[in-house]
Amino acid sequence: MLLGVMASAFMVAGPGGVSAETLESALAKAYGNNPNLNAQRAGVRAVDETVAQAKSGYRPQVNASADIGREFSQFDSRQPPSIFGGGGETISRSTPRGYGIQLDQSIFNGFRTDNAVRQAESNVLGSRESLNNNEQDTLFNAASSYMNVLRDTAILDLQRNNVEVIDEQLRQTQDRFNVGEVTRTDVAQAESRLAASRSQASLAEANLRSSIAQYRQFIGVEPQQLAPGRPLDKLVPRNVDAALKTAFGEHPAIKSAQHAVDVAELQVKIEQGALAPSLGVRATVAQRYDVRETGDESLNASAIATLSVPIYEGGQAYSATRQAKEQVGQRRLDADWVRDQVRAAVVSSWGQLEAARAQIQAAQAQIDAAETALNGVREEARVGQRTTLDVLNAQQELLNARVNLITAQRDRVVASYAVVQAMGRLHSRNLGLAVNHYSPKVHYDQVKDLWIGTSTPDGR
C-alpha cells in the first residue's frame, strides 16, 4: 500500500507487451541461477562424500598382486669329478612367478572409525546449514538489488523531471528579465540551479547503472520491467523479542557453529583412539611357480589375527589430543560469537525497519507541505512578493521530499527482508517461491553407503 505512492515511477522501461517482473519471480531466478549459490551446493555434495570415506574404515581392504621374473644361476665346482658325481659346471634357468590376494579387516581400532563417521555426519549437517545461510545471503542481495533498481529508476525520473521544470523556470525568468520584471541575478540563480540539476541527473543515471550491474550479478538477467516491491510483513514478528527467540532457535549460522563444536569434540575422541589397542585380521592366498626348481608349484593360504597395543609412540598422540581439546574450546567461543552477531543483526535490522516506517510517514507529510508551499511561493512570485530564488528553493525542497519518500520506501522493503534474514527464515520455501526446492539430502542418501563406483549420481 505504501509503495503505491510512487508505483508509476518504480518501473524500468522494457519491450512492449512484456509482463512486469515481480520481486518474487526475480528471487526465484536468483535461487536457481546464482553461481555462488550453486557453487555452495556443489561444495555440500563434496562434503557428503566424507561420510562414505569414513565408513570405509568398517570395510575390508583387498589387494591383488602378481609378479614374474627370470633367474639364472651357474655353479662351478673345483672338485674333480668322481664316480659319486660332483665337479664340473651346473647351470639352471627358471621363471619364478606367482599371484595372490590379501585381505585386511579391522576389528577394533579404539572406536576411531565410529567417531570418524559421526564426525563426517556432523560435517555434512554443518555444511547444509552453511548452505542455508548462503541461500539467505543470496536472496537478500537479490531483493536489495531489485529494490535498488526501482529506487534509482524513480530518482532518475524525478531528477530528469526536475531538469525540465527548472529549464522552464529559467526560460520564464529570462522572459521576465527581458521586460524588466527581474534582475540579471535572478537569471543567474536559475542558470546555476539548472546546472546543478543536470549534475544530479547525471549522478542518478550513474547510480542506476551501478544498481543494474548488481541486479545482473545476483539475479542473472538484465532488469526489464519491474513491478513495485512489497515488504515481507507476513514473516516479520510483532516485536524484537520474538524475532530474537526465533533467531536463536533457527538461524543457520548458529546451527552451523554448533555442528562445528560437535566436529571438534569428536576429533578429541578420534585422537584418543590412537592410544587404544587395535585388533585386525589379515588373510592371504598366494600361488607360486618355479619357487625352488623349474616346474614346481606351491599354494599358500593364511589367516592371522593381530593385536597391537601402543605403549609409547613419542608423544604424538598425546599432543594431538591436547590440541583437539583446545580446538573444542575455540569452536565454543566461535559459537558464542556467532550468537552475538545474530543478536546484533536482529536488533539492528529491527531498528532500521522501524526507522523506515517512520521515515515514510514523515516524507509523505513533507511532500504535502512542500507542494502547498511551492504553490504559494509561485503565486507570491507572480505578484512580486517572492524572488526567483524562493521558487527554486521551494522546488528543491519538494524534490528532496519525494526522493526521501522513494528512499524510505525502498528501505522499508529491504529492512523487512533484513529482519527475516537475521531471524534465519529467508528461504525459498518460506517465501513461497515457484522453484524446484533444492534438497541436499537427496544426494547424501545416494552416496553415503556406496562401496564402489567413480561416477557421480548425475552421471559425471
Image (cartoon, rainbow, N blue to C red):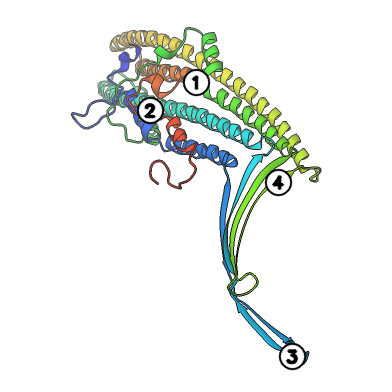
x, y percentage for residue 358?
45, 9
> The residue under label 1 is which amino acid type?
Gly
Q: Callout 4: 10 Å neighbours few (<14), some, many (20+)?
A: few
Q: Which residue is mark 2?
A: 437
Name the one closer to the observer, 282 or 63.
282
Badge nearest the viewer, 1 or 3: 3
The crowding category of the residue bearing disc 3, from other C-alpha atoms within 10 Å (few below 14, some 14 to 19, many at least 20), is few
- Alpha carbon of mark 3 to alpha carbon of mark 4: how far? 54 Å
> Which residue is tagged 4?
306
Q: Quadrant of residue 34?
A: top left
Q: Which mark is residue 83?
A: 3
Label located before the other in sequence (1 or 3): 3
Amino acid of disc 2: His
Residue 356 image position (x, y, % from top left): 45, 14
- Which residue corresponds to the image point at 59% horizontal and 22% vertical from the top-left? 341
Lateral position of residue 410 relative to residue 240, left or right = left
Q: What amino acid type should be assigned to the residue bearing mark 4?
A: Thr
Graded by Cα atoms within 10 Å as few (under 14), some (14 to 19) or many (20 or more), the crowding at tag 2 reads few
Q: Quadrant location of residue 79?
A: bottom right
| Placement of the N terminus among the 4 image quadrants | top left
Residue sitting at 67 percent across and 44 percent down? 280
Q: Is the residue 252 above or below the residue 449 in the image?
A: above
Q: Nearer the viewer, mark 2 or mark 1?
A: 2
| Upstream in sequence: badge 3 or badge 4 | 3
- Report which residue position mark 1 lands on: 424
Mark toward the start of the polypeptide (2 vs 1): 1
Alpha carbon distance from label 1 to label 3: 101 Å
